[in-house]
């Protein structure tokens, strides 16, 4: 039963991940929008004449006005125009590996814990236990899949860099190999604390809310156990997961994507430093950058995930 849960979750996750990959790429690009390298401190030049001082106006650095933030559709159109349609699937090999490692682990573990903790008579599990199972499964799954997550973020973000600064990874294996050689093995777990925190939040919100909403719909007799129930419960679960996880996701994306030059201080010292710098430079709502593509991706992803999962379970139950 346990191994079957891992296989079912893995298949459904890979299908959902690949089908919604372009939306995830747009989300990553929007989350990185507005990120700038630190500017040096610029002091005004002072011309002293006796006791009076005159400030030279030309010595001030006046930043240009920021352009209006682009929406997900315009970001997608811009990617296609500048990089081609294939760019929407940049990093899809990393998505497959990530879903194979991360989602297979979290879905399988959640299924194991659900089987162990469910009431033997009703077959149901309390919401508290569902959330706890999601937190445990998500954390372990994220730790396993972090290298693929780092590779995916970098491959998705590569197209926004100037040509001379692009990493141009050939694929997920090349990305992981080069990161290991150039930045050390530890770079594969860069942002892992954020990945684990995000995964715990997403898995608890996504899986627990899906099961809870589905059980409530069936218990109240609103709908029968079928496609309509699965779509309704899964879309609601996707919305809950998006709201809960977006701030952590923004910080995770920026920490994973930061470029560390030899001998130079990294742009961010860690997750908290990244969060503080982001809020200070761009405002608190910067933590919800990319929310529209996040919910646009989480909704379809969660729907495809659970609808596929339910169908795969039916097929596996025949054996």
Image (cartoon, grey):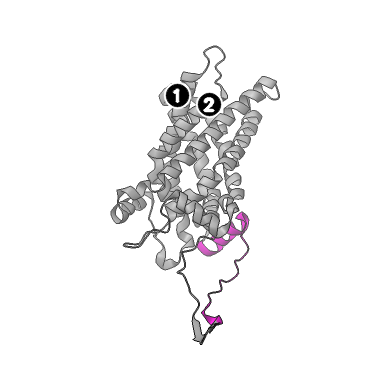
Q: Which residue corresponds to the image point at 62% horizontal and 23% vertical from the top-left?
A: 215
- Neighbours of disc 2 within 10 Å: few (<14), some (14-19), many (20+): many
Task: Answer whether residue 205 is magenta in the image.
Answer: no
Q: CA distance from mark 1 to mark 2?
A: 12 Å
Asked if residue 51 is positioned above or below residue 261 in the image, the reply reads below
Asked if residue 290 is positioned above or below residue 6 in the image, the reply reads below
The quarter holding residue 54 reads bottom right
> If the image is split into quadrants, where does the N terminus sit?
top left
Q: Which residue is mark 2?
A: 130
Q: Which residue corresponds to the image point at 52% horizontal and 13% vertical from the top-left?
A: 120
Identity of the residue furthest to the right in this view: 222
**Does label 1 or label 2 sit earlier along the sequence?**
1
Q: Which residue corresponds to the image point at 54% horizontal and 47% vertical from the top-left?
A: 247
Q: Is label 1 in a helix, a strand or a loop?
A: helix
The residue mark sitting in front, 1 or 2, is 2
Q: Is residue 90 visible?
A: no
Residue 96: % across, % down: 44, 43
- Between 38 and 155, the one lying in front of the other is 38
Asked if residue 174 is positioned above or below residue 130 in the image, the reply reads below
- Neighbours of disc 1 within 10 Å: few (<14), some (14-19), many (20+): some
Residue stretch rendered in magenta on the structure: 57-83
Q: Which residue is mark 1?
A: 112
Residue 160: % across, % down: 49, 61
Task: Answer whether residue 58 is magenta in the image.
Answer: yes
Residue 184: % across, % down: 30, 52
Residue 116: % across, % down: 46, 19
Q: How many marks?
A: 2
Q: Which residue corresponds to the image point at 48% horizontal and 32% vertical from the top-left?
A: 135
């Amino acid at each position: 039963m346990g191994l079957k849960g891992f296989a079912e979750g893995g298949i459904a996750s890979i299908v959902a991940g690949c089908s919604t990959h372009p939306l995830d790429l747009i989300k990553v690009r929007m989350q990185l929008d507005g990120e700038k390298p630190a500017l040096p401190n610029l002091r005004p030049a002072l011309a002293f004449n006796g006791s009076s001082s005159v400030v030279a106006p030309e010595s001030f650095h006046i930043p240009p006005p920021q352009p209006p933030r682009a929406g997900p559709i315009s970001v997608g159109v811009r990617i296609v125009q500048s990089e081609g349609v294939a760019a929407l699937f940049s990093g899809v090999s990393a998505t497959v590996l990530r879903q194979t490692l991360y989602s297979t682990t979290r879905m399988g573990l959640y299924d194991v814990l659900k089987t162990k903790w469910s009431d033997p008579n009703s077959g149901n599990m309390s919401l508290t236990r569902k959330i706890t199972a999601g937190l445990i499964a998500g954390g372990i799954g994220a730790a396993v899949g972090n290298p693929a997550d780092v590779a995916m973020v970098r491959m998705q973000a590569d197209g926004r860099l100037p040509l001379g600064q692009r990493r141009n990874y050939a694929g997920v294996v090349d990305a992981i190999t080069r990161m290991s050689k150039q930045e050390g093995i530890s770079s594969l777990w860069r942002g892992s604390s954020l990945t684990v925190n995000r995964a715990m939040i997403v898995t608890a919100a996504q899986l627990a809310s899906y099961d809870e909403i589905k059980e409530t719909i069936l218990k109240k007799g609103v709908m029968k156990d079928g496609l309509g129930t699965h779509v309704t419960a899964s879309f609601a679960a996707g919305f809950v997961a998006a709201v809960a996880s977006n701030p952590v996701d923004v910080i995770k994306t920026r920490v994973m994507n930061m470029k560390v030059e030899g001998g130079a201080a990294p742009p961010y010292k860690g997750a908290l430093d990244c969060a503080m710098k982001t809020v200070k430079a761009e405002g608190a709502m910067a933590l919800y950058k990319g929310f529209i593509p996040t919910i646009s991706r989480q909704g379809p992803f969660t729907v495809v995930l659970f609808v596929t999962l339910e169908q795969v379970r039916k097929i596996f139950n025949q054996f």
